[in-house]
Image: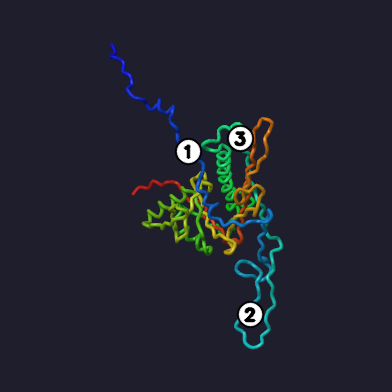
């Protein structure tokens, strides 16, 4: 036989919540990453949608410098009234051109929702914020993978280092030795973790630096920036990119339009596409971008390094 029934003697939390105001966050998105490549690239604003990289001519049939460029004849160490050579710097007759790509989506919000449910957060604003975050993730992916300008497709043969075993200090040194003013490495987080394990195995301790409030690993003073958009192969192999950046240093640059209709940020446009017969308003969200490698040694890549966790016995 059960005892006497007990009744609550005070208001419980379940009841209290019917009168309470709930504090809410803005919608969270698990797919957002730091997008270091977009943040670290110097961006060139284009007056039109095409960027031409003019270069010195390369002609194997004529005397040239160590890069194959047609030599500029120079005299030095002469005395008196020596006859000086005549010369000119010839230009590449077929310079590469890069056209801006676009990533777009349409955001639809019913006017009833926008009118009645815009407190405490603007529904349209939050929908556009999430759409822009997704487009920015695609933008960084394409900066690496696009066949026309993606960095993975534009590493010169002389700047490729075939890896062996895990990524180690010797292989990163080989990358650095092939260029001046390396600004940063770019690698998958698992590749960076494998580099840390190899350093630990050798008793080495990489440096650290703070970039935009984040503590990052460095090697020889060059930060290793993580991105999950570099592929990991089926055999647990990864790659490491290294970049010199900026037009002044003949490096890698990002490209974007100087101005756009309905621009909300450089390279970004949010344009109203009207209200349809169902009272649904549509917004066209666009981001225009590309990248360019100005000279071959601006970009290097270590390929085929083992990023799997090795279980070694002592």
Asked if 67 appears above or below 83 in the picture, the reply is above
Q: In front here: 6 or 242? A: 6
Specify few, some or many for label 1: CA neighbours under 10 Å numbering under 14, 14-19, or 20 or more. Answer: few
Quick check: 283 left or right of 20?
right
Q: Can you tell which mark lies on residue 60?
A: none
Query: Which quadrant of the view contains residue 78?
Result: bottom right
Within 10 Å of disc 2 (Cα), the crowding (few <14, some 14-19, many 20+) is few
Q: Position of residue 49 (x, y in %)?
A: 68, 53
Mark 1 element type: loop
Q: Secondary structure at mark 2?
A: loop
- Residue in view at x 41 percent, y 52 percent: 196
- In the image, which is nearer the foreground, mark 2 or mark 1? 1
Label 2 or label 3, whichever comes before in sequence order: 2
Q: Disc 3 or 1, which lies upstream in sequence?
A: 1
The quadrant holding residue 155 is bottom right
Labelled disc at residue 75: 2
Q: CA distance from mark 2 to mark 1?
A: 71 Å
Q: CA distance from mark 2 to mark 3?
A: 71 Å
| Image-based side of 83 in relation to 194, left or right | right
Tell me what residue is drawn at x 62 percent, y 36 percent. Answer: 108
Task: Give the residue at mark 3.
Answer: 109
Query: Which residue has dot 1 on it?
Result: 25
Residue 231 shown left or right of residue 87 in the figure: left
């Amino acid at each position: 036989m059960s005892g006497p029934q007990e009744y609550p003697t005070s208001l419980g939390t379940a009841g209290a919540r019917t009168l309470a105001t709930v504090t809410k966050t803005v919608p969270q998105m698990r797919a957002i990453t730091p997008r270091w490549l977009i943040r670290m690239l110097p961006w060139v604003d284009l007056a039109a949608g095409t960027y031409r990289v003019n270069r010195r001519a390369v002609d194997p049939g004529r005397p040239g410098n160590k890069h194959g460029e047609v030599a500029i004849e120079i005299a030095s160490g002469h005395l008196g009234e020596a006859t000086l050579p005549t010369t000119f710097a010839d230009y590449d007759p077929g310079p590469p051109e890069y056209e801006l790509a676009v990533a777009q989506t349409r955001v639809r919000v019913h006017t009833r929702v926008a009118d009645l449910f815009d407190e405490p957060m603007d529904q349209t604003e939050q929908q556009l914020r999430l759409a822009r975050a997704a487009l920015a993730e695609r933008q960084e992916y394409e900066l690496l993978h696009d066949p026309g300008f993606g960095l993975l497709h534009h590493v010169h043969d002389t700047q490729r280092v075939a890896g062996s075993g895990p990524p180690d200090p010797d292989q990163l040194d080989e990358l650095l030795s092939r260029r001046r003013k390396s600004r940063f490495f770019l690698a998958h987080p698992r590749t960076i973790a494998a580099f840390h394990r190899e350093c630990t195995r050798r008793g080495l301790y990489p440096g650290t630096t703070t970039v935009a409030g984040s503590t990052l690993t460095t090697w020889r003073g060059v930060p290793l920036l993580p991105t999950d958009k570099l592929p990991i192969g089926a055999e647990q192999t990864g790659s490491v990119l290294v970049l010199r950046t900026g037009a002044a240093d003949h490096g890698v640059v990002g490209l974007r339009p100087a101005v756009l209709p309905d621009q909300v940020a450089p390279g970004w446009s949010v344009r109203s596409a009207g209200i349809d017969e169902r009272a649904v308003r549509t917004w066209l969200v666009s981001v225009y971008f590309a990248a360019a490698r100005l000279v071959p040694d601006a970009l290097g890549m270590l390929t085929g390094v083992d990023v799997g966790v090795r279980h070694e016995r002592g």
